[in-house]
Image (tube, grey):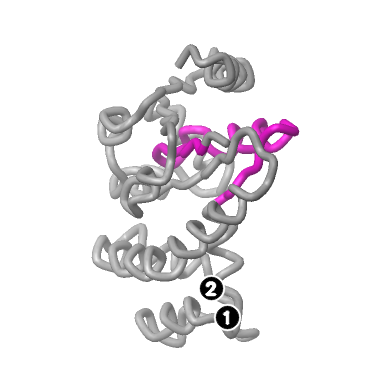
């Protein structure tokens, strides 16, 4: 089994690539954002820690996490983002490592870890290869606006607190430039084909 980490800044196309990969029978996908959501439901230690760090107002009336409010906080305050990341690494990384361990017992050719904070969490150490997606800034802005139904200024502020593409590409084994004419499905199929044939 080959473990492949996928990362890149917001709007680079990680979700689209993961959807393409998830259609393949030889792939198992660990979507770290989904794991984070699963681990932040009412009653979990992770959510209790978030409430402790950000206050009761971070919860909705039904006890669920107010993701919209949390998003506003972390995208406008670097300190808040760092605080949340620290909590996430504390609780979520161990869960990801457990899932990797269990996956090794299965008959899987490729285990994909889709993680926006792959490098920050140190998860790249558990990957055989790291694939990074990059894109033109204006295209990323457009994608973020369409995906999250937000205005351009908000999208730009989100990108400003994230790393530049160079941060990712310097650490990558394989870079996909996901711009207008990119065929993501073809790109990833070529890469996986090279891995199978031992050409990469």
Q: Could you say where residue 193 lies in the image, as x and y percent from the top left?
A: 59, 16
Q: Residue at 42%, 78% (x, y): give it.
A: 50
Which residue lies most toward the front here?
105
Q: Could you say where residue 9 lies in the image, as x and y percent from the top left?
A: 40, 39
Question: In which image quadrant can residue 64 be found?
Answer: bottom right
Q: Residue at 51%, 38% (x, y): give it.
A: 3
Q: What's drawn in magenta, residue-wise?
A: 3-31
In the displayed structure, 190 sits above or below 136; it is above
Residue at mark 1 to residue at mark 2: CA–CA distance: 5 Å
Mark nearer the N terminus (1 vs 2): 1
Q: Looking at the rendering, in which quadrant would you find the C terminus?
A: top left
In the displayed structure, 64 sits above or below 13; it is below
Q: Which residue is mark 1?
A: 60
Q: Looking at the rendering, in which quadrant would you find the N terminus?
A: top right
Instruction: Specify whether 145 is left or right of 9.
Output: right
Q: Which residue is mark 2?
A: 66
Total of numbered circles in the picture?
Answer: 2
Q: Nearer the viewer, residue 195 or 141?
A: 195
Q: Residue at 55%, 80% (x, y): give it.
A: 44
Q: Could you say where residue 48 lies in the image, as x and y percent from the top left?
A: 47, 84
Residue 38 covered by magenta stretch: no
Q: Could you say where residue 152 lies in the image, as x and y percent from the top left?
A: 43, 42
For the residue labelled by badge 1, is the local secondary structure a helix, a strand or a loop? loop
Does the rendering let one see residue 183? no
In the displayed structure, 71 sits above or below 114; it is below
**Mark 1 Cα shell of 10 Å, populated few (<14), some (14-19), many (≥20):** few
Does the rendering let one see residue 110? yes
For the residue labelled by badge 2, is the local secondary structure a helix, a strand or a loop? loop
Residue 5 covered by magenta stretch: yes
Asked if the residue under mark 2 is in contact with the one under mark 1, i.e. CB atoms within 8 Å, the reply is yes
**Mark 2 Cα shell of 10 Å, populated few (<14), some (14-19), many (≥20):** some
């Amino acid at each position: 089994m080959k473990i492949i980490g996928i990362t890149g800044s917001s709007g680079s196309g990680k979700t689209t690539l993961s959807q393409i990969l998830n259609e393949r029978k030889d792939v198992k996908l660990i979507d770290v954002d989904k794991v984070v959501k699963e681990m932040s439901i009412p009653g979990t230690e992770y959510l209790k820690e978030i409430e402790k760090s950000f206050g009761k107002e971070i919860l909705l009336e039904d006890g669920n996490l107010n993701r919209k409010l949390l998003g506003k906080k972390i995208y406008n305050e670097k300190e808040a983002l760092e605080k949340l990341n620290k909590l996430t690494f504390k609780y979520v990384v161990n869960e990801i490592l457990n899932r990797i361990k269990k996956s090794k017992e299965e008959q899987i050719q490729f285990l994909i870890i889709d993680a926006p904070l792959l490098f920050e969490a140190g998860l790249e150490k558990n990957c055989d290869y790291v694939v990074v997606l990059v894109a033109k800034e204006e295209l990323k802005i457009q994608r973020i606006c369409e995906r999250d139904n937000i205005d351009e200024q908000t999208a730009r502020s989100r990108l400003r607190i994230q790393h530049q593409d160079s941060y990712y590409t310097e650490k990558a084994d394989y870079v996909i430039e996901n711009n207008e004419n990119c065929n993501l499905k073809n790109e990833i199929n070529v890469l996986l084909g090279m891995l199978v044939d031992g050409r990469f």
